Amino acid sequence: MSVEVKNVTKKFGNFTALDNVNLKVESGELVALLGPSGSGKTTLLRTIAGLEFPDNTGEAQVLFYGEDVTQIPASERKAGFAFQHYALFRHMSVFENIAFGLRVRPKATRPPETEIRARVEKLLKLIQLDPLANRFPSQLSGGQRQRVALARALAVEPKVLLLDEPFGALDAKVRKELRRWLRQLHDEIHVTTLFVTHDQEEALEVSDRVAILRAGKIEQIGTPEEIYDRPASPFVYDFLGNVNLFHGRMKDGAVVIGGTEFATQDAAGEQDSEAVAFVRPHDIRVTRQASGPALAATVIRSNAAGPVANLELKRLDSGEQFTVQLSKELFQELQPKPGEQVFVELKNVKIFSDDYSI
């Protein structure tokens, strides 16, 4: 069941939440809508669900498997929706919460009781909570409640599953466990799924593709590898992780920073024009003696807690500070001390023209 959004614009007063958005999600695909607060990701999800309607009704379309559902209300779109805050009925058991969407159907379309029970029992096994069928939401952990909310959304056999920050209210450890579970669940049921998140790591780990939104527009869409390794703009580059900026000038397809020439990826900009080099902290090599193009820097501080070691360095030529990530092994080998001079080599340098903005 594919989902397609065409030319959708949505405003709230003077604020443009969606600005002529176009998006297609293939049947069985899991797509993350990622972006900062106010970028339009939740409004886009609600528009697909039928909880919001486009302003430009003459031009905009929302299609489910080629069928135009733009003006069809949410109750008739057959979309399953799960929110950040569960919205479980406290007076109902886990079993009855999952069965709720089936039981409230009009009598003509309501499945027989035996079918309802069979469907709920199957979902309880799928979410690995069948021993807890008779418990109430207050007797469950946050992660268990969210699984119940997802099962309730799946019980009505939706054409598309829409998840709005499904793990946002959970602590980091439970989030990691549940996103792995969500990926496994999706691989089993193959329901076309869109989920909103502001967590970059979550989006990159779980989804087939990621759509990054900014100011009501889709800035880039692609596989996790594509958007991380080949960001389309400075905003995407910065949003998907820490990045260092080095100002320089273009020369023969390379960038000159502080008098040193570095090779670049997909060099942009005219010859001898100003440019900004984007380099991720883990793409900087630190040595005590320069063996190639390098910048001299001073160690300000280091922090080796966690899976990698982080260094704060200051360039000797300009005084600008930047961050480097080293493996624990290399950190132990170098043992850099505050105040010590080192050399840094910039790898995987990405260039954008000097009209960048983050």
Image: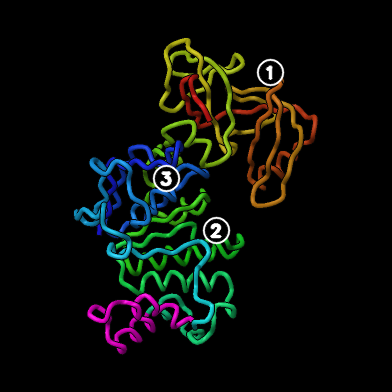
Amino acid marked by disc 3: Glu
Q: Position of residue 1 (x, y in %)?
A: 25, 60
Label 2: how many Cα within 10 Å (few below 14, some 14–19, many 20+): some
Marks 1 and 3 close (CB-CB < 8 Å): no
Amino acid marked by disc 1: Ser
Instruction: Name the residue furthest top.
Output: 272
Instruction: Name the residue furthest bottom.
Output: 114
Figure check: 357 above or below 173 = above
**Magenta segment boundaries in residue numbering:** 94-122
Q: Is residue 234 magenta?
A: no
Figure check: 352 above or below 51 = above
At a point 54% along the width and 18% down the height, the residue shown is 261
* Label 3 to label 2: alpha-carbon separation: 24 Å
Q: Quadrant of residue 323?
A: top right
Q: Is residue 115 magenta?
A: yes
Q: Position of residue 17 (x, y in %)?
A: 43, 41
Disc nearer the start of the sequence (3/2)? 2
Per the image, label 1 sits on a secondary structure element best described as loop
Marks 2, 1: nearer the viewer: 2
Residue 318 - label: 1
Residue named by callout 2: 168
Per the image, label 2 sits on a secondary structure element best described as loop
Pick whichever, 218 or 334, lies toward us.
218
Label 3: how many Cα within 10 Å (few below 14, some 14–19, many 20+): few
At a point 39% along the width and 45% down the height, the residue shown is 211
* Label 2 to label 1: alpha-carbon separation: 41 Å
Q: Position of residue 190 (x, y in %)?
A: 32, 65
Marks 3 and 2 close (CB-CB < 8 Å): no
Residue named by callout 3: 225
